[in-house]
Image (spheres, grey):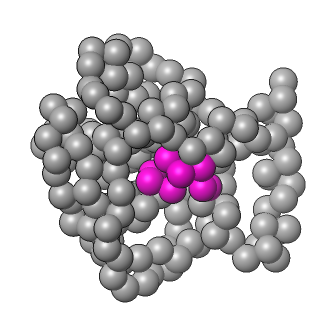
Amino acid sequence: MSVLEIRKYGDPFLRRKTIPLERIDDRIREIVYSMIDTMRDSKGIGLAANQVGFIERICVIDTTKGEKKEDLLVLVNPEIVDRTGKVKLEEGCLSFPGIVEEIERAYKVKVKALNLEGKEIEIVGEDLLARVLQHEIDHLNGILFIDYLHFVRKLVIQKKLNELKNIHKR
């Protein structure tokens, strides 16, 4: 396993929609273990495969930042099947270092996915877990959290966004 480079805003790969997996093999497991290492090394609570250059529909989530190993989620082909309530809270992203914005999302979600063994699972998340599930599944669909910002708010942070784009171009 290894720590992978996290793609930053401006990298077109972040806008790519991921492809569902038909099978889970050793290559996929290696990707997942490297994603977990990368998420933990970056002090993140979620990471989508396209944030580290893979097109497979996989994300990893750990809202405890490694404190509770049993809370680590590996989701293959996740889909949100139900949303309840709305709440507006601050949100950040490893692909947008230094940018934190208030984003409105569902308070509670139900997600269906496969685990790393290929077994179908259902996750019901509220509050922070619901937010991270939505954020990471958005990534897998090529949607970024800034896409939810009002255009005026985007104008306010445009300088920071341009700086990230320029870093990516180097």
| Relative depth, front residue between 41 and 122 | 122
Looking at the rendering, in which quadrant would you find the N terminus? top left
Residue 56 percent coordinates (x, y): 45, 33
**Is residue 146 magenta-colored?**
no
Q: In percent of the image, x 27 and y 26: which residue is there?
A: 24
Q: Measured along the vertical axis of the image, is residue 114 above or below residue 156? A: above
Q: Is residue 143 magenta?
A: yes
The image quarter in which residue 34 lies: top left
Which quadrant is the C terminus positioned in?
top right
Residue 30 shows in the view: no
The reply, left or right, for residue 3 in relation to residue 141 is left
In the displayed structure, 120 sits above or below 5; it is below
Question: In this view, which residue lies farthest toward the bottom?
Answer: 85
Residue 4 in the image: x percent, y percent?
A: 50, 21
- Compared to residue 150, the image places residue 68 above or below, namely above
Tell which of 53 and 2 is nearer to you.
53
The residue positioned 66% from the left and 45% from the top of the image is: 15
Please state the extent of the stretch shown in magenta in the rendering: 136-144
Which of the 4 image quadrants contains residue 6?
A: top right
**For residue 58, side relative to residue 7 (left or right):** left
Tell me where residue 143 appears, x and y as whole percent.
Answer: 60, 55
Residue 75, quarter of picture? top left
Location of residue 162 in the rendering, given as x and y in whole percent from the top left corner:
85, 48
Nearest the viewer among 139 and 118 is: 118
State left or right for residue 140 relative to residue 76. right
